[in-house]
Image (tube, rainbow, N blue to C red):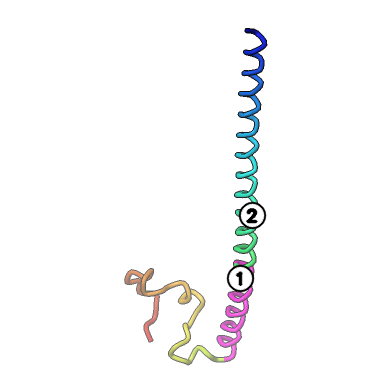
Amino acid sequence: MKWGKKNKSAFVDELENKKMERLNSKLYMENCMIMQENEKLRKKAQLLNQENQALLSQLKQRLTMGGQNDNNTPNSFTDLTLSPATNHGSSSSRKP
């Protein structure tokens, strides 16, 4: 009887080990996919940041070259942060 119990225990241990290996492989693959997606998003964020910096530079250039007389251009940088959705009736913003 003892020999049979040892074999059964070893068999159960082997099954559990294989199950853990499969789970580990699955989690490893999920982690790799998450890291790939993270890298894509990081690159996209970097490109958006570069675009934002270029647009901000263009805006600063327009403002320093007299573009503030144009009705579509804000009169100060503080106006850039005030959109109609977030303004909530603030008297500091100017309407064209």
Q: Which numbered tag is attached to residue 35?
A: 2
Residue type, label 1: Asn
Which quadrant would residue 93 be assigned to in this image?
bottom left
Q: Secondary structure at mark 2?
A: helix
User: Residue visible at 64% across and 54% down?
Assistant: 35
Kindly report the secondary structure that dominates the magenta region of the rendered protein.
Answer: helix
Q: Is residue 53 magenta?
A: yes
Residue type, label 2: Met
Q: x, y (%) of residue 26?
A: 61, 44
In the displayed structure, 38 sits above or below 79; it is above
User: Residue visible at 62% across and 39% down?
Assistant: 22
Q: Is residue 44 magenta?
A: no
Q: Which numbered tag is attached to residue 49?
A: 1
Spot the residue most to the top.
1
Return the residue nearer the eye: 53 or 69.
Answer: 53
User: Residue visible at 50% across and 79% down?
Assistant: 76
In the displayed structure, 35 sits above or below 70; it is above
Return the residue nearer the eye: 9 or 39.
Answer: 9
Q: x, y (%) of residue 89?
A: 32, 72
Q: x, y (%) of residue 88?
A: 33, 69
In the displayed structure, 27 sits above or below 67; it is above
Return the residue nearer the eye: 66 or 16.
Answer: 16
Mark 2 neighbour density, 10 Å: few (under 14) some (14–19) many (20 or more): few
Whether residues under marks 2 and 1 lie with C-beta atoms below 8 angstroms apart, the answer is no
Q: Mark 2 or mark 1, which is nearer to you?
A: 2
Which quadrant would residue 49 be assigned to in this image?
bottom right
Magenta residues span 45-65
